[in-house]
């Protein structure tokens, strides 16, 4: 989860965190850590919820 926050911080370094950047980060992480599409969707949602805790 720390890596996710680091990547989000880097993406936000210009003062704006675009939804496209968030979607790309979440998609890549969910594919990296989940084997099938159902698990990927669940993980993507969990990561999005975590990221919104900023």
Image (cartoon, rainbow, N blue to C red):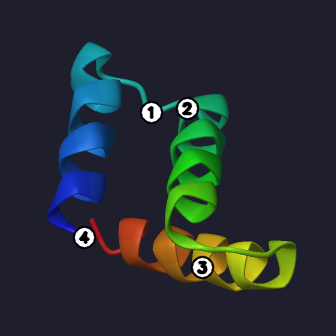
Measured along the vertical axis of the image, is residue 10 above or below residue 50? above
Task: Name the mark on residue 21.
Answer: 2
CB atoms of marks 4 and 2 within 8 Å: no
| Residue highlighted by disc 3 | 43
Q: Is disc 4 placed on a helix, strand or loop?
A: loop
Q: Is disc 3 placed on a helix, strand or loop?
A: helix
Mark 1 or mark 3, which is nearer the start of the sequence?
1
Q: How many marks?
A: 4
Q: Residue at x 28, y 40 (%)?
A: 7
Task: Name the mark on residue 17.
Answer: 1
Residue count near mark 3 (Cα–Cα under 10 Å), binned few <14, some 14–19, many ≥20:
some
Q: Position of residue 12 (x, y in %)?
A: 31, 30
* Viewport quadrant of the C terminus: bottom left
Kindly report the distance in space between the C-alpha atoms of the residues bearing marks 1 and 2. Answer: 7 Å
Residue count near mark 2 (Cα–Cα under 10 Å), binned few <14, some 14–19, many ≥20:
some
Task: Name the mark on residue 1.
Answer: 4
Q: Nearer the viewer, mark 2 or mark 3?
A: 3
Q: Is disc 1 placed on a helix, strand or loop?
A: loop
Kindly report the distance in space between the C-alpha atoms of the residues bearing marks 3 and 4. Answer: 12 Å
Q: Position of residue 20 (x, y in %)?
A: 66, 31
Kindly report the distance in space between the C-alpha atoms of the residues bearing marks 3 and 1. Answer: 20 Å
Mark 2 or mark 4, which is nearer the start of the sequence?
4
């Amino acid at each position: 989860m720390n890596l996710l926050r680091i990547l989000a911080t880097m993406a936000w370094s210009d003062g704006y965190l675009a939804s496209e950047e968030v979607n790309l980060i979440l998609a890549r992480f969910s594919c990296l850590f989940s084997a099938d599409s159902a698990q990927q969707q669940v993980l993507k949602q969990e990561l999005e919820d975590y990221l919104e805790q900023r």
